[in-house]
Image (tube, rainbow, N blue to C red):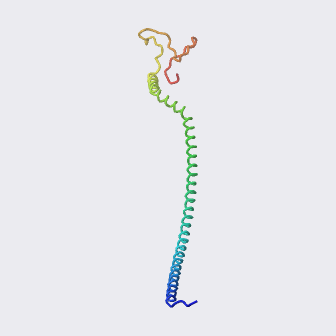
């Protein structure tokens, strides 16, 4: 075997040197890429932790809001039940008061004639009873039948009732 010519050795050395430089360059790029990946991994880990913390806080806030809304719902339901009970009581009271209201309406409707009747009775009392049977004070048409109370009852023939105006009739 013969020794390789010097040119081949130089070319081989130059090739080895280029491969070595290329390997060094690739190693440097690999280290830079590893540092970049490592930094990105750290940033992603930190971002993941922040997002998990934010998600946990959001979950807690949601749970607090749900609890507050449930409490508000219970309070509202209690108020509704209380108001419904009050409405039932008022309805019962209205049912109890309706007959009285009808009676008061009837009384109010009948009041004007009653006022007129009371005024007439007061006028009759003011006029007083008729004078005693005095032959000098006869009515122009002459003597008439004896007067009786207008109670609708028949007067006892043995005991005639005198006619008296007043509020006791």
Q: Position of residue 78 (x, y in %)?
A: 58, 49
In this view, 137 is above or below 16 = above
In this view, 148 is above or below 97 = above
Q: Nearer the viewer, residue 94 or 15?
A: 15
Q: Nearer the viewer, residue 84 or 142?
A: 84
In this view, 106 is above or below 59 = above
Q: Quadrant of residue 34?
A: bottom right
In this view, 53 is above or below 111 = below
Q: Position of residue 18 (x, y in %)?
A: 50, 84
The residue lying furthest to the left in this view is 140
Identify which residue is drawn at 50% across, 31% down.
104
Identify which residue is drawn at 52% across, 83% down.
19
Please tell me how many numbered marks the rendered image carries: 0
Q: Quadrant of the N terminus?
A: bottom right
Q: Nearer the viewer, residue 48 or 104?
A: 48
Q: Position of residue 23 (x, y in %)?
A: 53, 82
Q: Position of residue 12 (x, y in %)?
A: 52, 86
Identify which residue is drawn at 55% across, 68% down.
48
The residue lying furthest to the front in this view is 1
Q: In the figure, is residue 128 to the left or right of 46?
A: left
Identify which residue is drawn at 48% across, 16% down.
132
């Amino acid at each position: 075997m013969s020794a390789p010519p010097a040119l081949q050795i130089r070319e081989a050395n130059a090739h080895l040197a280029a491969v070595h430089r290329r390997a060094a360059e690739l190693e440097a790029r690999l280290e830079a890429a590893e540092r970049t990946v490592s930094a990105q991994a750290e940033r992603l880990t930190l971002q993941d932790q922040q997002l998990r913390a934010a998600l946990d806080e959001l979950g807690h806030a949601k749970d607090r809001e749900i609890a507050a809304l449930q409490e508000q719902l219970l309070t509202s339901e209690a108020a509704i039940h209380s108001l419904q009970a009050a409405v039932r009581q008022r309805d019962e009271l209205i049912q109890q008061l309706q007959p009285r209201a009808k009676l008061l309406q009837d009384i109010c409707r009948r009041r004007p004639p009653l006022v007129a009747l009371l005024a007439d009775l007061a006028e009759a009392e003011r006029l007083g009873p008729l004078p005693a049977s005095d032959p000098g004070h006869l009515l122009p048409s002459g003597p008439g039948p004896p007067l009786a109370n207008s109670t609708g009852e028949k007067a006892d023939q043995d005991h005639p009732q005198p006619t008296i105006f007043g509020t006791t009739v």
